[in-house]
Image (cartoon, rainbow, N blue to C red):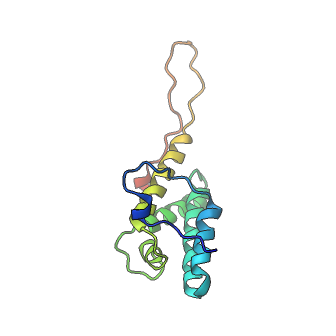
Amino acid sequence: METQIPTPEERGVDGLEPDHMLPGQFFGALRSQAGTSGERRLMAAVLQEGIETLQKTVHATDPEGREAFCDALAWLRARHDADLFSFTTVCAVLDIDADWLRDALLRRVEARRAEGKRPAAPATPASAPVVETEEIEPLRRCG
């Protein structure tokens, strides 16, 4: 039995459906769709690597991790890139709505970055406000 990724029409456009899907469900569906073509399997692997890199490095503080995050984010954001392995091309080959997936991933990255804020130690007086010591770097700085 072949698992299919629902089209935007099948998902509905009313926004009532959750954006949650397990990686195994998503990439399993891609692998089963890509089963007949080496090129499609390669495209699915490129998409999987890009998404996993984005998720693994979202809170990176080391230079290599930050660079990997910014590269993955730039790859995701590029809308009119005609390269063979651009996000838009990969999604088109795999019959995935690139704009929908891009928006969902960017929302997830923003949420994960917001979760990473850490408040400073409380000031001496108990009534003093808590100040954010670690500002979350805006995503726009990566591109």
Q: Residue furthest left?
A: 80
Where is 86 relative to 137, above or below? Answer: below
Q: Which image quadrant: the C terminus? A: bottom left
Observer-nearest residue: 87 or 28?
A: 28
Query: Measured from the top left, where is residue 99 in percent x and y?
Result: 39, 64
Q: Residue at point 60% right, 59% down?
A: 65
The residue located at (51%, 65%) in the rendering is: 72
Kindly indicate the quadrant of the structure image that contains residue 142: bottom left
For the residue pair 15 and 121, the one nearer the viewer reads as 15
Side (left or right) of 78 relative to 23: left
- Residue at image position (42%, 68%) is 97
- Up/down of 126 relative to 121, above or below: above
* Residue 86 percent across, percent down from the top left: 45, 75
Q: Against 109, is 71 above or below?
A: below
Q: Is residue 12 visible?
A: yes
Where residue 67 sits in the image (x, y, percent)?
54, 62
Q: Quadrant of residue 78?
A: bottom left
The x, y position of residue 25, in whole percent, is: 62, 63
Q: Is residue 6 left or right of residue 79?
A: right
* Total marks in image: 0
Quadrant location of residue 102?
A: bottom left
Q: Is residue 143 visible?
A: no
Q: Residue at x 43, y 76 (%)?
A: 92
Foreground: 143 or 76? 76
Quadrant for the N terminus, please.
bottom right
Viewer-proximal residue among 78 and 67: 78
Please, which residue is most extreme toward the front here?
A: 1
Q: In the image, 61: left or right of 82?
A: right
